[in-house]
Amino acid sequence: MSERDERARPGLLSAGSVVRTALVVLLAYAVLGAVAGVVWEWIWTPPGQIIDRHQVLFDSYASLRRVFSGTGLYALVGGLTSALIALAVTTLTRGRELWVLLFVIVGSAIGAALMWRVGTQLGPTDPASLAAHASGRTAVAGNLTVSGRSPFLVWPMTSLFVLAMIYFAWPNVSGGHDSATPSTDRREADTSQARPG
């Protein structure tokens, strides 16, 4: 194998390296997405509710205001977690930008889903399901929910934003050097062969 081929090899992606990168990125999003779900439920304060005559009512105006805190905290915790993962991924996987872009899109969707799933499973039961079986006036805690679909886009949007900022601020130029080296070697070889004697 020539010296030129040895220099070109680091710029190429073998099948093993792509699979390994995919596993690392997807596993990071899955694990930290589940951890973010635990943190989301831990810092959230459930609204106080009352079941009366099989109807769910809020016990105060303060509880009514806390209804949307679950969605806001989901976006906050999810955005911070997604940004940290994307920062680590882009730092450790330079030279594989197109693959990493694909893995980050898929991984961020996994992280968003796992955060929601873990957080809602750890949170209180939906009072509406308890109202059908409750007898008398019963105080319960509101359940942890996300209102609408747009908060789930925080994960991929934040990850892609961090990716773009890092790639623009610190572009990977090693590929250009690797591709230029073989052509330089060929020109030097042609020049040496063309010399008389």
Image: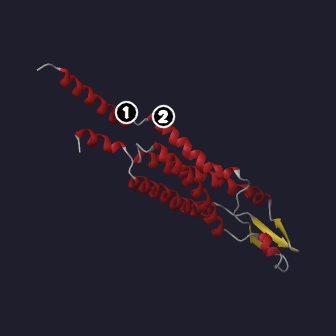
**Counting other residues with Cα less than 10 Å from the Cα at mark 2, is it few (<14), some (14-19), or many (20 or more)?**
few
Residue 71, position as x, y percentages in the image = 69, 55
Front one among 182 and 155: 182
Q: In which quarter of the image is the N terminus?
A: top left
The answer to whether 174 is drawn above or below residue 99 in the figure is above
Residue 151, position as x, y percentages in the image = 67, 51
| 9 left or right, relative to 104 | left
Who's the residue at 42% across and 45% down the image?
91
Residue that carries the numbered disc 2 in the rendered image: 168
Q: Which amino acid is tagged 1?
A: Gly
Colouring method of the image: secondary structure
The answer to whether 100 is drawn above or below residue 32 in the figure is above
Residue 61, position as x, y percentages in the image = 80, 58
Quadrant housing residue 118 = bottom right
**Total number of numbered discs in the rendering:** 2
Calculate the distance from the C-alpha at mark 1 to the C-alpha at mark 2.
16 Å
* For discs 1 and 2, the disc positioned in front in the rendered view: 1
| 70 left or right, relative to 32 | right
Residue that carries the numbered disc 1 in the rendered image: 176
Is label 1 in a helix, a strand or a loop?
helix
Residue 11, position as x, y percentages in the image = 36, 42
Residue 26: which disc? none
Who's the residue at 38% across and 34% down the image?
173
Is label 2 in a helix, a strand or a loop?
helix
Q: Which amino acid is tagged 2?
A: Phe
